[in-house]
Image (cartoon, rainbow, N blue to C red):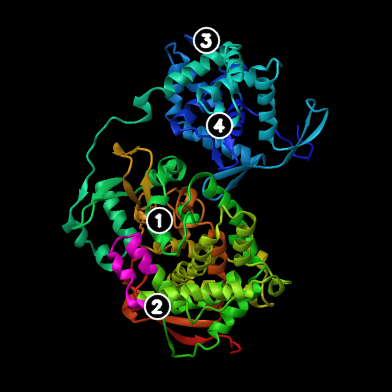
Amino acid sequence: MPDSGLTIRKLTLPEELILMLLNEQTGYFHQVPGWALNCAVVGAALAELSLLSRIDTDLDSLFLLDRTETGDPVLDPMLQEIADEPEQRNAQYWIEKFALNADSIIDQTLDRLVEAEILEHHDGQFWTLTETRWREDLFGASQTGTVGQFIKTRVVKALFTDVIPEPREIIIICLINTCDVLRFMFQIDEETQERIDFICQMDLIGRSIASAVQHNIASLMLRRSTLTKKRPVVALRRLLLSPHFRSGNVPALFGDLTKEYGPVFEIRAPFVKPMIFLGGRETNEWVDRHGRMHLTAWGYFADFEKVYGAHGVLPSLDGGDHFRLRKAMGPAFSRSRLSGQLDQVYRLAREFMANWAVGETLPVRTCRRMVNAQLSSIFLSVDSQDIVEDLIEFKERALIVHIMHALPGFMLNTPGMKRRAKAVDTLIERIRSVHTPAQRAGCARDLADDWLSLHASDPQLVPESNLRFALAASLVASVYLGDALSFAVYVLASRPDLCERIREEADALFENGDPDGDDFNKSSMEVTHRFLMECLRMYPIVPMSMRDVMNPFVIGDYEIPVGSRVNIAQTATHYLDEVFPDPFSFDIDRYLPPREEHRDPGYAPYGLGTHKCLGSRWMDLQLAVNVLMIARYVTLEVSPAKYVDALRFNPLPSMKPTEKLNFRVIERRHELAA
């Protein structure tokens, strides 16, 4: 048991199996395809019921012994179904039946391990083991490590010594061996394999469960559909006549197409390959849970990263290297990092707003420049206001050419683009000039410090050739945060009722001086928090993502073959009535109990799965601080007024308001020092 004051109940076999299979190098499970994992986890649950004397099983049959509930929310529903079945069934039948819905078992098991502080969950559907102290007679003293290490120690003893394993170890070894992953976890020679085969014959429960799991894993009909349902094709006329297509509202457009055509459809435009689109709540859930096994980011991103002379940058990586890089850079993009630098945000925001005069008209790009002034200083310790437009235009042109393929390649080599490309070199030169050891002494750590330090400590993971992209891309993040701010300011200026409620929270926060990071919580900015959630729902900056298919999969009876490129319209759900009723209504009460519509997998403003935005919590805080400060210091109105009720968008390469949108300063509530 733990020696840290934490009480942990005895682990079940499904929990031990999950911990055993967890690969901390990738943050996910050892090379186990989804169906095999489902079968193995169900097998572990049935074996646990057997050890609890609720069922008995042999190679031919499974018998009910006792229908008394165990008190385990994972095991009891399975026990109930077995008890209610009028016919005698075997283990293979029950594994096949339960494996079809095993995702809920895996989810509950992971949640319980997180609640017990055995696992830690990270954004992007990654998990790592937490440190725990264990008393174990094996070493004659307390051992410091993780519960997973403790379980693996027991398995290692069983595999590599003559110790007779306990039934639980036998079952775990049988199941892992059936999934064919022991060879990825340990060095298995011929002698060890003989030992594994011997162990797998030692226990009748383990043998029968493993045999049933193996038969189900081998069933191709269950792992992969043989249906060849033809993907529906969106009529080009239907697309062009859509009001959302004409206004540039991408998530609303794909919400309509998903309702009409289903979760998979094609768009065939002249002179380009047919484009496959995925949309809908179930699709979002599938991508979030299983996308890592079937989809890869490298192929579609390769040409874009070459523009910066890079290869294997964070957005293009998958698997173990991607997890390592996210884990290493996570603190740099964390909310806590920003919380410690809010004094800079306040100062830079006030300096930027100080020159806003009553009656002045501000172009919508003002929001980008406001955010850039903050991120340049906080991320890179430089000023980039004079070159930020060139950096943004070069990056957006590269995205349109190499990611969206909406322009031919020569459009990136025009004289204007070549001139703008030089801004990247100017930025890197500025960063290097102020990031010498002497100049950084006593300074708060910034993002450039993190990238340069990681390059020095692990030049294979972050080679120097990738620094140019990493540092420039960090600054261009002001595009996304700035455009999100512009949408929020648009709603603030067009909804005086909401503006007044947010202003009340801003005045309360700032009336006694500048608040610290802990002051920005759901209680102090309850309205602002829901307001921003609704802004991100209605106006997601990155409404779609692109991936290449490395392993075939089936969604909604449509098989997507290897080599396909899919466009995942993850925010199509933001405009589906079954997920967000009356989706065109700006309603911040969606996020209050009992509605809590954001808990649906259909809410995906920051993406899905392993490539979910690493800086989402940073963005939430910086966005909130800027909205609150704008509401406190000035009153704005939308110009021209026609956009109050009918905003138009520029959807390429990411979604932003039309550049024709402006904000007019109509009141200054507090003075700001210029």
Q: Which residues are magenta?
A: 396-416
Q: Amino acid at mark 2?
A: Arg
Q: Amino acid at mark 1?
A: Phe
In the rendered structure, find residue 58 and report the number of the disc placed on it. Answer: 3
Of labels 2 and 3, earlier in sequence is: 3
Q: Is residue 628 visible?
A: no
| 242, above or below 84, in the image | below
Of labels 4 and 2, earlier in sequence is: 4
**x, y (%) of residue 50?**
58, 16
Disc 4: which residue: 184
Mark 3 is surrounded, within 10 Å at the Cα level, by few (under 14), some (14 to 19) or many (20 or more) other residues, namely some
Camera-near label (2 vs 3) is 2
Mark 4 is surrounded, within 10 Å at the Cα level, by few (under 14), some (14 to 19) or many (20 or more) other residues, namely few
Asked if marks 1 and 2 touch (Cβ < 8 Å), the reply is: no
Asked if marks 4 and 2 touch (Cβ < 8 Å), the reply is: no
Q: Amino acid at mark 3?
A: Asp
Disc 1: which residue: 301
